[in-house]
Image (cartoon, grey):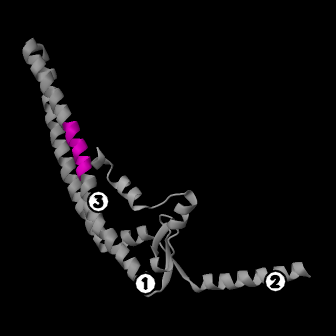
Amino acid sequence: MMKKTLKLALAAVLMLGSSSLFAQKFGRINTQEIIMSMPETKTMQTNMEAFGKELQDNIETMNVEFNTKFQDYQKNLNTYTDTVREMKERELQDLQGRIREFQERAQQDYQKKSDELLSPIIQKAKEAIDKVSVAGGYMFVFDTSTGSLAYFNETTLTDIAPEVKKELGITDTPEAAAATTTPAAAE
């Protein structure tokens, strides 16, 4: 009889707890899909294609220059004095180094420009997700493209960091905070 009463009480607690859980609204979104469907993304991709083509054209121009000089070097190799041959080899090596350096910088510039153009698009999508989430009364919205939270209502959450710090024996005294923020000042 006692076991049966305990099971009924446990079931009642679980039902009450789960009913409050079901009262909360959860959503999902594929942020990547949203960003890819935004008109701004299509414009960004067009701009990036043009920028990439410009960089590629510069690399090709440098490669043509190298190939022309290399063919000239090979064609006239037997007529060069040692000094001229060494100078031509050094010139080819320098040109190869500049091409390699330009390719590396072009790759960095391409990534930087992509990040610059994509950042406001991501921000706009995030603001829209937040606005829809708040208006819809969602507590959590999961991003299925990354497996993370796209939105959460922070006012309904309790920060458990103080309890975790207490469990770990960490104290936040003003002296401890000052010591961790200004170690260079003590030197």
In the image as oriented, which residue stretches furthest toward the right?
1
Q: Nearer the viewer, residue 149 or 15?
A: 15
Q: Which mark is residue 8?
A: 2
Which secondary structure class fits the magenta region best? helix
Expressed as whole percent of the image width and height from the top left, the position of residue 64 reads: 16, 37
Tell me which label, 1 or 2, sits earlier in the chain: 2
- In this rendering, the answer to whether 121 lies above or below 57 is below
Task: Say which amino acid is labelled 1.
Answer: Val
Q: Quadrant of the N terminus?
A: bottom right
Q: Is residue 73 visible?
A: no
Magenta segment boundaries in residue numbering:
99-109
Expressed as whole percent of the image width and height from the top left, the position of residue 117 reads: 26, 64
Task: Say which amino acid is labelled 2.
Answer: Leu
Q: Which residue is mark 3?
A: 115
Within 10 Å of disc 1 (Cα), the crowding (few <14, some 14-19, many 20+) is some
Distance CA(mark 1)–CA(mark 3): 28 Å
Q: Secondary structure at mark 1?
A: helix
> Going by the image, does 141 lie left or right of 57?
right
Within 10 Å of disc 3 (Cα), the crowding (few <14, some 14-19, many 20+) is few
- Residue at image position (19%, 43%) is 59
Q: Nearer the viewer, residue 183 or 60?
A: 183
Which of discs 1 and 2 lies nearer the camera? The answer is 2
